[in-house]
Image (cartoon, coloured by chain):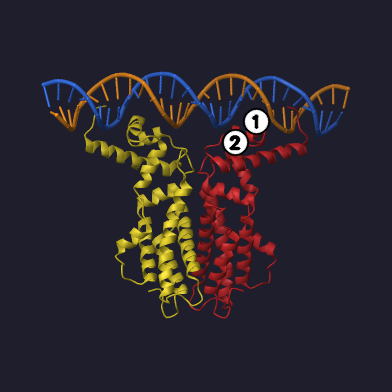
Chain colours: A red, B yellow, C blue, D orange
Amino acid sequence: MARRTKAEAEATREALLDAAEEVFFDNGVARTSLEQIARHAGLTRGAVYWHFKNKADLFRAMLDRVRMPFEELVAETGASHASPLETVRLGFQQSLLRLEQPRYRRVLAILIHRCEFFGDIDPCAIQTEMAGECLDALGGYFADAHRLGLLKEGLDPEIATRLVQAILSGLFHDWLRDPDAYSIYERGMVLVDAQLSLIGRDQAKAA
Amino acid sequence: MARRTKAEAEATREALLDAAEEVFFDNGVARTSLEQIARHAGLTRGAVYWHFKNKADLFRAMLDRVRMPFEELVAETGASHASPLETVRLGFQQSLLRLEQPRYRRVLAILIHRCEFFGDIDPCAIQTEMAGECLDALGGYFADAHRLGLLKEGLDPEIATRLVQAILSGLFHDWLRDPDAYSIYERGMVLVDAQLSLIGRDQAKAA
DNA sequence: ACATATCCATACATACATGAATGTAAAAGG
DNA sequence: CCTTTTACATTCATGTATGTATGGATATGT
């Protein structure tokens, strides 16, 4: 095979990552060989070893295409001067919308349900990192809400944070086991709205 | 090696399952060979293939030692004539106590974080089954609570069910990523009590 | 006491997956 | 226009896991 132009080379790199997503999703990470990925992209292992050091490196590159820090999602909504609780709601909403995009759905399903640690990759640590970011962000908003007197009296803002974080996490894991069963966006928004309504001061219903 | 007595044979079977738990937990299911498990138990693959058909069969046997249906946990508490909300609390409590036992912790950590599907095993389906049992049970209790007027007015019992189920699931997954970081029993009970307090009618605080 | 089934170790055949080495044709660069 | 990289394909050596076949010693049933 002949040498490709830089643009073409980048295209084959992306093709390999696309193929990795599909084959990893279908067969699990451990059970798929680099040969399978290469052939699924219409290439050979030579291409894989050219663009990536090994399987772990390929995996990392695949993950790098779908990072989504909670704070960035909030920023995208342009909710800079909304109330803390409304900001949480918008961040939640934006997160759920992302999750319904096929790429995010596939890659996260791979990370959660279709790989164990291998090489120097520890999916568990990656999950912990993502969850930690989210928890910190939520904690900040609920602390603000507490200072502004927006939370139900007697409710520790830290408890509120952990409740909402657990709900998001639980919803996420349950949905990811069978993403076609229902829309995580619709069901998720119902749950957040209900929880925010329970958490907020009585006059302040979820909005 | 010579033939062993029936009791001895059963002991080596248990030893193999114990070894499987430890090695699976340390290295992940896909990355551990049957040879590793056998040697960790001071045996050889011959013993493994005698007691189990293959890796999937061994895995299934390991799981069978730690089944814990939510309803059975509730029954253990002897909460037969308590209020639905109190019953949920007791079931929750019993579940969390179980999770702090090393064997349950290890095996569930393996199921959730250290295996992908292989052979005819689909960990995802097993998780779905377990979650489904729990959800059904919770749904029943909250329906009862609603009929008895124990829920906050205007709160759909199905929403309440899903909120509590998501909290349990989220808590479980977060804790399992790093079980030594905190006690799931203590933190979990704080969260359930807080949520039950939010969900219940005002005069009926979490107890 | 005898035959047999049991419990496990050992040996072997097969099958992949990896990574490195090598080949190669075209694009970049001067 | 010539050289040097680049972007892959191909080949090979090695390691490792699996499943099965076989052997051997002893419990166990009768």
Of residues A202 and D4, the one nearer the viewer is: A202
Is B31 drawn above or below residue A2 in the view shown?
below
Density class for disc 2 (Cα within 10 Å; few <14, some 14-19, many ≥20) is few
Mark 2 element type: loop
Left-right relation of A51 to A162: right
Q: Amino acid at mark 1?
A: Thr
Residue B183 visible at all: no
Q: Which mark is residue A54?
A: 2
Q: Where does the C terminus of chain B fall, quadrant-wise?
A: bottom left
Residue ID at (49%, 64%): B162
The image quadrant of residue A206 is bottom right
Residue ID at (55%, 55%): A181
Is B141 drawn above or below residue A43 in the view shown?
below
Mark 1 element type: loop
Q: Nearer the viewer, mark 1 or mark 2?
A: 1
Of residues D14 and B18, the one nearer the viewer is: B18
> In the rendering, at what x and y percent does residue B100 appear?
37, 56
Label 1 sits on residue: A44
Q: Which mark is residue A96?
A: none
Of residues A121 and B134, the one nearer the viewer is: B134
Q: Amino acid at mark 2?
A: Asn
Question: What is the C-alpha distance between the residues marked 1 and 2?
Answer: 14 Å
Residue B27 visible at all: yes
Density class for disc 1 (Cα within 10 Å; few <14, some 14-19, many ≥20) is some
Q: Where does the N terminus of chain B fall, quadrant-wise?
A: top left
> In the rendering, at what x and y percent does residue A121 appear?
54, 43
The image quadrant of residue B151 is bottom left
Is A191 drawn above or below residue A131 in the view shown?
below
Residue ID at (29%, 65%): B78
